[in-house]
Image (tube, grey):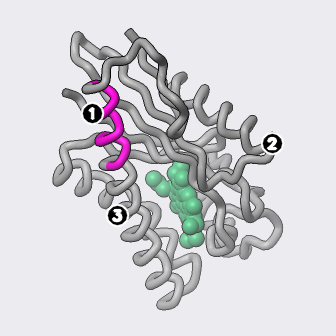
């Protein structure tokens, strides 16, 4: 059975109480891990920008973002990743279910929702095992525009990005847009 929860919306009456409590716990844990990931990433990004500007900071996103995700995965036991409807790295291309959820996030944003509040969770079966899945929208902040913006992106940054990511789609974002989403999974 597929259980779907939209943010903290009222749960289906068919769900049992223990299952509900377990999911609430998983949601809290997923949010905590995301906070840790985002804080670490932003810290590294700001430091690198200060030290050598956006061209220098590209390496943070290029090398460190996947590494931080792997480290957090290893220490927490959760699968941790980032994806987007307009991905920069092909390694971050969305799976069909991730695309569907992000499309729903976009629709909700268009209807007036604050991207900061958009998340999703469900429980599915994968290879005979129950998997808790969680996604959280990532809003575009001002600092992100150095590498994900439009015409404001410096030519040397554009050149570096082009050589690293020939099929980059992650340009032209504005502050407040949904840049992508965190994806977390836990098998139990
Ligand atoms: C210095 C340049 C730079 C800045 C600033 C930057 N990014 Fe990125 N971003 C990148 C690069 C490079 C990648 C590809 C990372 C990889 O190879 O996994 C990336 C990838 C991502 C991804 C993963 C999905 C994808 O498109 O591949 C998300 C989500 C993302 N960035 C969000 C943000 C947000 C939010 C901010 C602002 C807080 C930000 N970025 C600031 C360069 C940057």
Q: Quadrant of the N terminus?
A: top left
In the rendered structure, the answer to whether residue 95 lies left or right of residue 18 reads: right
Magenta-highlighted residues = 19-28
Q: What element carries label 3?
A: helix
Splitting the image into four quadrants, where does ligand 1 fall?
A: bottom right
Q: Mark 3 points at which residue?
A: 36
Q: How crowded is mark 2: few (under 14 residues within 10 Å), some or many (20 or more)?
A: few
Q: Mark 2 points at which residue?
A: 110
Residue at 51% across, 46% down = 136
> How far apart in space, not on screen, are marks 3 and 2 (Cα)?
28 Å
- Magenta segment main secondary structure: helix
In the rendered structure, the answer to whether residue 169 lies left or right of residue 127 reads: right
Q: Relative to 84, does residue 42 appear above or below in the rendering?
A: below
Tell which residue pokes out farthest to the bottom in this image: 51
Q: Is mark 2 within 8 Å of ligand 1?
A: no
Which of label 1 and label 3 is nearer to you? 1
**Is 114 in front, or is 86?**
114
Label whose residue precedes the other's in the sequence (3 or 2)? 3
Look at the image and say whether residue 23 sits in the magenta stretch: yes
Residue at 22% across, 17% down = 129
Which of label 2 and label 1 is nearer to you? 1
Q: In which quarter of the image is residue 171?
A: bottom right
Q: Is mark 1 within 8 Å of ligand 1?
A: no
> How far apart in space, not on screen, are marks 1 and 3 (Cα)?
21 Å
In the rendered structure, the answer to whether residue 74 lies left or right of residue 136 reads: left
Q: Mark 1 points at which residue?
A: 22
Q: Does the residue labelled 3 lie within 8 Å of ligand 1?
A: no
Q: Is residue 88 visible?
A: no
Q: Quadrant of residue 105?
A: top right
Look at the image and say whether residue 117 sits in the magenta stretch: no
Q: In which quarter of the image is the C terminus?
A: top left
């Amino acid at each position: 059975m597929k259980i779907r929860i939209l943010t903290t919306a009222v749960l289906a009456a068919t769900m049992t109480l223990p299952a509900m409590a377990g999911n609430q716990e998983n949601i809290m844990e997923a949010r905590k891990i995301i906070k840790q990931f985002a804080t670490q990433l932003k810290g590294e990004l700001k430091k690198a920008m200060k030290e050598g500007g956006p061209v220098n900071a590209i390496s943070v996103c290029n090398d460190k973002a996947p590494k931080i995700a792997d480290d957090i995965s290893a220490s927490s036991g959760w699968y941790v990743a980032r994806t987007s409807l307009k991905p920069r790295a092909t390694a971050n291309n969305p799976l069909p279910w991730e695309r569907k959820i992000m499309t729903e996030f976009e629709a909700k944003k268009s209807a007036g929702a604050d991207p900061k509040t958009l998340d999703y969770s469900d429980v599915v079966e994968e290879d005979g095992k129950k998997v808790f899945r969680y996604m959280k929208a990532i809003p575009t902040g001002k600092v992100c525009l150095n590498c994900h913006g439009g015409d404001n992106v410096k030519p040397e940054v554009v050149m570096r990005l082009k050589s690293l990511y020939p099929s980059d789609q992650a340009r032209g974002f504005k502050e407040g847009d949904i840049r992508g989403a965190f994806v977390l999974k836990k098998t139990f």
